[in-house]
Image: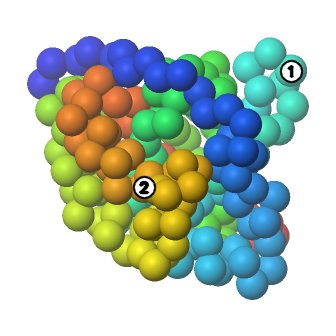
Amino acid sequence: MTERPPTLVRIRPKGLQRLLLKLPAYLYRGPLASLLAWRCVVLLTTIGRKTNLPRRTALSAMRVDDRFIVFAGLAGIRADWYRNILANPEIIVRYGHRCWRARAQVVLDPAQRRAFMERMATYSRRCGPPRPTRPLLRLLRIFDYDAEIAFALAHAEELPVVEIVPHTALPRC
């Protein structure tokens, strides 16, 4: 196993795309929480590296046994949630109506990052925006889910991948 930290750098989304990508974090309540979990979305609460305040982010995740794998594909190593995890790996994960305290660990092995991304490419067919909406999102240049998966596969060894290991269930979310 060769350890090498991820290096992927991308320009962060702006404008309408940024707004739409932040929307699920605000909608992750009530029946929508179950719907988002069904679409492979988890809600992470990290601690801000500068402010020490809680920061919530909704991310596409892959469930592997008793843990989750998340990818920082849209902003790479510049993603705020990723930099917060590097500063403080203790987080809270919400998946539907269940919450856990968890520890986030960056996957340092490029081969393991590639293996996780290849697995996610197959897993992602049932995740993300519903299939009928994808052409419209692509046409409006809001978000091209399939192109993002292809980009992540092409850059899988540099892509920041985080393994989230829940350790304590929380009674309420």
| Residue nearer the viewer, 66 or 37 | 37
Residue ID for mark 2? 145
The residue lying at 29 percent from left, 24 percent from top is 158
Task: Tell us which disc is closer to us: 1 or 2.
Answer: 2
User: Badge 1: how crowded within 10 Å, few (<14), some, or many (20+)?
Assistant: few
The answer to whether 82 is drawn above or below residue 56 in the figure is above
Q: Position of residue 145 (x, y in %)?
A: 42, 55
Amino acid at circle 2: Tyr
The residue lying at 65 percent from left, 49 percent from top is 21
The residue lying at 75 percent from left, 66 percent from top is 28
Q: Quadrant of the N terminus?
A: top left
* Residue 101 visible to an observer of this rendering: no
Q: Is residue 152 left or right of residue 83?
A: left
Secondary structure under the numbered disc 1 in the rendered image = loop
| Residue nearer the viewer, 78 or 166 | 78
Quick check: marks 1 and 2 in contact, CB under 8 Å?
no
The numbered mark, 1 or 2, whose residue comes first in the sequence reads 1
Residue ID for mark 1? 51
Q: Is residue 130 left or right of residue 31?
A: left
- Which quarter of the picture shows residue 48? top right
The answer to whether 78 is drawn above or below residue 169 in the figure is above
The answer to whether 22 is drawn above or below residue 107 in the figure is below
| Alpha carbons under labels 1 and 2: distance apart | 32 Å
Q: How many marks?
A: 2
Q: Position of residue 38 (x, y in %)?
A: 52, 78
Q: Position of residue 103 (x, y in %)?
A: 55, 41
Q: Position of residue 133 (x, y in %)?
A: 51, 73
Secondary structure under the numbered disc 2 in the rendered image = helix
Q: Residue furthest front?
A: 139
Amino acid at circle 1: Thr
Q: Residue furthest bottom?
A: 31
